[in-house]
Each structure stands twice: as C-alpha cells, then as structure tokens.
Image: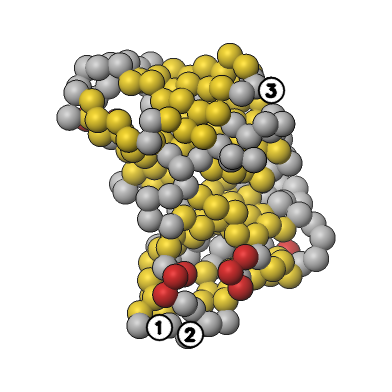
C-alpha cells in the first residue's frame, strides 16, 4: 500500500528565504507524485506533478520538486518565499491499483514572516 | 471549463436533519472523489467512484452517510440524520490520469 509522510506539520520562513517542504513516500510500483496547495477557505490546487519523465519538476508560482528514487523523496522547494505563499501544502502519491486514487500526506502549513 | 462545481457552499443545519451535498465533476473525467476535512482529522477520503460505480466506500464514517452518482455529471453525498460531529468542509474532486481537481468545498455546520 502507498503512504506519504510530510515531515513537519508547520514550517515558518522569513520572506525572501528558501522554502523547503519535505515529502517521503512508499510505493510498491513506480509512483506518480503530486504537490497540492490549499489557500484559506479554498479547495486544493495542483502545484506540480511527477509522472516518470524529468526528475526535476517545475510548477506554478516558482515552486519545484525533485524526485529522488533512492531516497523515496519528493521535496518541494522555492528559492525565495513570498507572503502570498502562506498556505497548506499536501504531497500525494498515486495508487495504480485503485483507479485515479491518490494517497495524501498530512499536510504542512507554511507561514511566511515579513 | 468551469471546474468542479459544488453546492451549496455553506450549509447550517440542526442536528437530526438530512443534509445533501452536490457535485458536478469536470466533463470527461471518469473518477469522482468525496473528501472531508477537519482540523482534528485533516483530509479524509470518504468514497470514490470510477465510471459512476462506487469503488471504495471504506472511508464513509457510518451508515448515516451515503453517496450516489446517477450519471457522469452529478454526484450527491447525503447525511441522514446529521450530527454536530459531522461539521467539516466537504470536498468533491474529479480526476483523469491521476490529476485530481478539487471543488471549492461545502462548509457544513451542524448545531
């Protein structure tokens, strides 16, 4: 069965600082991996996805993530945080045995200090 | 495309009443998911459908919850009778090729 672990339920950075949100997964088959962002009072929006092409994936709003098979990781980064990046971020892994189902991590709330 | 549409956006009801949440998925998507989100339990998958057929409802908390998908463009999640602990934000998502697209959610408050 697939599982996702997001280390750190809360991360705080200063505006302009590097953002690093950690995601580790377990999967019995090569996975598809996703990062979603949820702004207050909104649904989840897709930030980026890995589907077995390039291991470094670029998404919206300057975010990117690197798939590292040896570390079973898919960490999300952004070089310089902006106040508007404050939100909750979810990592997810596909379950190829269950249609289009995704297994989500517990989420990481990113806070950006001025 | 209008995206996933959910209605109502907000629902306030009294304990014991029936609540029906509605979802219109993105046209052409063959999978539909219902999630519940609370501060305490985070994001929980309640049930999902493939090609209008319920595949896994193991996340439905109890028999008070039921979901239907009578056709490819409409699904409902019903709670009868509702209880205060059902208060949460309920999301519908539709999917094609694993990418899930979420609706704006229905914020349910049961008093």
Of the 4 image quadrants, the one containing the N terminus of chain B is top right
**Point 71% across, 38% down: residue:** B96
Q: Is residue A111 above or below residue B39?
A: below
Q: Decide: few, some or many residues near mark 1? Use Cα within 10 Å; few <14, some 14-19, many ≥20.
A: some
Instruction: Give the residue number, with chain letter if any, for mark 2.
Output: A17
Image coordinates of residue B42 in percent, x first then y, are: 39, 47
Image coordinates of residue B37 in percent, x first then y, are: 39, 42
Image coordinates of residue A19 in percent, x first then y, are: 51, 77
**Residue A86 vs residue A28: left or right?**
left
The picture quadrant where one finds residue B111 is: top left
**The residue marked by circle 2 belongs to what chain?**
A
The numbered mark at residue A14 is: 1
The reply to whether discs 2 and 3 touch (Cβ–Cβ < 8 Å) is no
**Point 61% across, 73% down: residue:** A62
Helix, strand or loop for disc 2? loop
The numbered mark at residue B76 is: none
Instruction: Give the residue number, with chain letter if any, for mark 3.
Output: B51
Same chain for marks 1 and 2?
A: yes
Q: Is residue A45 above or below residue B110?
A: below
Q: CA distance from mark 1 to mark 2?
A: 5 Å
A108 or A28, which lies in front? Answer: A108
The picture quadrant where one finds residue B90 is: top left
Q: Decide: few, some or many residues near mark 3? Use Cα within 10 Å; few <14, some 14-19, many ≥20.
A: few
Helix, strand or loop for disc 3? loop
Q: CA distance from mark 2 to mark 3?
A: 45 Å
Residue extending farthest front: B1
The reply to whether discs 1 and 2 touch (Cβ–Cβ < 8 Å) is yes
């Amino acid at each position: 069965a697939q599982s996702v672990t997001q280390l750190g339920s809360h991360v705080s950075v200063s505006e302009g600082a590097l953002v690093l949100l950690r995601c580790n997964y377990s999967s019995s088959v090569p996975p598809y991996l996703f990062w979603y962002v949820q702004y207050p009072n909104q649904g989840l929006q897709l930030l980026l996805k890995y589907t077995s092409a390039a291991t470094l994936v670029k998404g919206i709003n300057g975010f990117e993530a690197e798939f590292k098979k040896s570390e079973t990781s898919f960490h999300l980064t952004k070089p310089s945080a902006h106040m508007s990046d404050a939100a909750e971020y979810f990592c997810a892994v596909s379950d190829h045995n269950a249609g289009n189902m995704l297994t989500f991590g517990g989420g990481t709330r990113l806070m950006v200090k001025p | 495309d209008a995206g996933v549409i959910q209605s109502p956006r907000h629902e306030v009801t009294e304990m014991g009443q029936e609540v029906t949440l509605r979802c219109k998925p993105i046209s052409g998507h063959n999978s539909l998911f219902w999630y519940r989100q609370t501060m305490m339990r985070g994001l929980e998958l309640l049930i999902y459908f493939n090609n209008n057929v319920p595949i896994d409802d193991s996340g439905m908390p109890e028999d008070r919850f039921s979901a239907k998908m009578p056709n490819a463009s409409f699904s409902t999640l019903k709670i009868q009778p509702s209880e205060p602990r059902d208060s949460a934000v309920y999301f519908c998502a539709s999917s094609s090729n694993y990418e899930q697209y979420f609706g704006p959610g229905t914020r349910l408050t049961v008093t």
